[in-house]
Image (tube, rainbow, N blue to C red):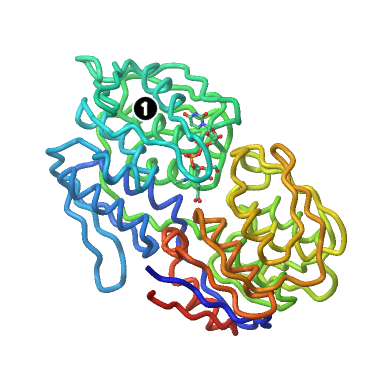
Amino acid sequence: MDIFEIDGPVKLSGTIEVAGSKNAALPMMAASLLAAGETVIPNAPNLADIHSFESLLSQLGARVSRDANGALHIDATTIDNPVGEYDIVRKMRASICILGPLLARCGKVKVSMPGGCAIGDRPVDIHLRGLKALGARIRLENGYIVAEAPPGGLVGAQIFLGGPFGSTVLGTDNVMMAATLAKGATVIESAACEPEVADLAHCLNAMGAKISGIGSPRLVIEGVNELKPVSWTVIGDRIEAGTFMVAAAITKSRLRLRNCDLNHMVAVVDRLRSIGAVIEPTEDGCEAAQYGAICPADITTQPYPGFPTDLQAQLMALLALGEGNSVITEKIYPDRFMHVAEMNRMAANLRKEGPSVIVAGVERLIAAPVMASDLRASAALVLAGLAAYGTTVVHRVYHIDRGYEKIEEKLNAVGAKIRRVDV
Ligand code: EPU
């Protein structure tokens, strides 16, 4: 099992190429199931989660390959086993988004019910409610969700997709994909507005779907008879970009990021600027720098366009070195605070109070052995390690490999000192 040894503190400088978005690529891979023929995703990131999804698609009957340029090819002409097995779904919850496309394409699908994970319960009730509204019959059988379309196929409907924590990203993806092939019009109210959902909707339209209201909480989908495969380049990963912006800020350095769109990061840029970071747009991304003190700030995670939960842990690492007290409140996953105890092992002063963490800034973080618990928490520990005095050892880096492509190589290329060691 790999660990990272991170020497700090370091100064960074140079340019980092941000990868294609994981959370845009995964639903796009599911969307390939809607069309017979070959879908191509030229910039699908090379990550553990994407590899798991490739295995899932192969199990369903699709043919999946990467070409010499790294583009992902998915030939979904034959889907002869519409079953999402427990072994894959338990590793990667995004597998749930095969539900909508397979229901629409095959009329029947069976997917293991995902369990909880390190960041909380993560139910799928809203996904199922939306698919039922389109006429699907759904039952739970031996831990599997079994969904069947009515004999004449799915039928468009008016659907409310809001839940106790706002909209649902993969739930909106699932219902939107199913509705593209339903009879008549579907209106999704309280749809997720995340750029990854909008990217999927644009991709579906390129495939022949008729979706309007893209990027808004009200999506209108006119069902069509069939979709055709396309080649679709996914958006840059705003969460990876945000992680590298924090890398610049926490090391009081300056980095140039390519392939990111600041229009997708307005809340993040707003908070980073209030902390004292300088974020300037460039032609293909931005420059991120921190010259002076890290100012305290209050942050509340919210559905898009609010501050993303996927950057909460990283900002906590930064504010741990703030000159004063900050409050970070988690409104999407109230239990997503596994990193708090680990950062305190590095001499941070963090105190959890219900869904909030009071961050009392300290002058220095001090290296320690720490344990990664989930993808974004591990990224935060790596960031803390860049600024901490001594050699931080991050265990279980497989969590980070799920969502960051060669993070240690990217950071080392701009001055970090991170060793991957197989222990
Ligand atoms: N929720 C329900 N019922 C549902 C679905 C969701 O109550 O049926 C709740 C969730 O428990 C949560 C909130 O609604 O409290 C929002 O969850 P959402 O469904 O939007 O999350 P998701 O679609 O399962 C995606 C990302 C996550 C990201 C969240 C929130 C992918 C593959 N995953 O998950 O990304 O945190 O949206 O933005 O797109 C990550 O990349 O590290 C990651 C966890």
Residue at x-position 55% and y-position 75%: 16
**Residue ID for mark 1:** 179
Residue 17 is situated, as x and y percent measured from the top left of the image, at 51, 73
Q: Which quarter of the picture shows residue 252?
A: bottom right
Label 1, secondary structure: give it. Answer: helix
Residue 147 is situated, as x and y percent measured from the top left of the image, at 27, 23
Residue at x-position 77% and y-position 72%: 364
Residue 154 is situated, as x and y percent measured from the top left of the image, at 29, 20
Q: Is residue 122 above or below residue 247?
A: above
Quadrant holding the N terminus: bottom left
Q: Seen in the image, is 305 located left or right of residue 52?
A: right
Residue at x-position 38% and y-position 62%: 47
Q: What is the number of callouts on the image?
A: 1
Q: Seen in the image, is 80 located left or right of residue 330?
A: left
Residue 66 is situated, as x and y percent measured from the top left of the image, at 25, 65
Kind of residue sitting beneath label 1 = Ala
Q: Which quarter of the picture shows residue 200?
A: top left
On the question of residue 284 being in view, the answer is no
Nearer to us in this view, 369 or 85: 369
Q: Is residue 282 above or below residue 103?
A: below
Nearer to us in this view, 23 or 153: 23
Quadrant holding the C terminus: bottom left
Crowding at label 1, few (<14), some or many (≥20) Cα neighbours within 10 Å? many
